[in-house]
Structure formats: C-alpha cells, structure tokens
Amino acid sequence: MGKPMIPDRTHNYISPEEYLKLEELSPLKHEYIQGETYAMACANDAHVTVTVNLVTLLRNHVRGQGKRI
C-alpha cells in the first residue's frame, strides 16, 4: 500500500504573530485555528436580539430545576 495522504499545511499556514498583525488591519474578524484563518460571521442587531431572547426563554424554562445554561 502507498503512503497515506497528508494535507500540505505550509500553503495556508500563518504564525500567530502574523494573524494578530493582519487582524488589526482587517475589517472582518477571523478565527485562528492551527495556523489557518476562517472568516467569522458578523452578528447584527437582529441576530443579537434573537440570541438574547432564546437564552432568556431557555433559562426561564429550566429555572428551579437545578440545571444551568
């Protein structure tokens, strides 16, 4: 059998220092995972409102049951 294929990570790899420097200048925010960056979705007011309302409903639902959200 042949060797297992291993992805070449050198092409997209950036150091943590490079990431931080680029992130300061970027209008978009990114996640940094093992040398690669991924654009993060932007949260607008509508998304934040939906999230807060959902968490509030879930918290009220489990209140007094010894569970934590």
Image (cartoon, helix red, strand yellow):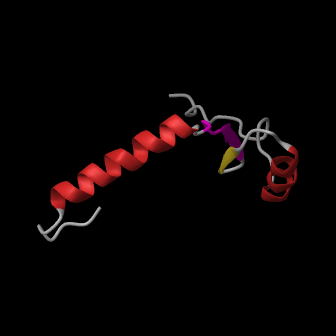
x, y percentage for residue 1?
A: 50, 28
Q: Is residue 36 above or below residue 60?
A: above
* 15 relative position to 55: left or right: right
What residue span does the magenta drawing correspond to? 36-42
Query: Which residue lies at the image location 87% right of the left edge and 53% below the top edge?
Result: 21
Give whichever of 8, 22 is nearer the camera. 22
Give whichever of 49, 17 is nearer the camera. 49
Q: Is residue 43 above or below residue 32?
A: above
Query: Which residue lies at the image location 80% right of the left edge and 47% below the top edge?
Result: 14
Q: Is residue 54 magenta?
A: no
x, y percentage for residue 68?
A: 25, 66
Query: Which residue lies at the image location 55% right of the left edge and 39% below the top edge?
Result: 45
* 43 relative position to 24: left or right: left
* 25 relative position to 66: left or right: right
Q: How many marks?
A: 0
x, y percentage for residue 66?
A: 15, 71
Q: Quadrant of residue 44?
A: top right
Quarter of the picture containing the C terminus is: bottom left
Residue projecting furthest to the top: 1
Give whichever of 2, 61 is nearer the camera. 61
Q: Quadrant of residue 59?
A: bottom left
Q: Is residue 40 magenta?
A: yes
Query: Which residue lies at the image location 17% right of the left edge and 55% below the top edge?
Result: 61
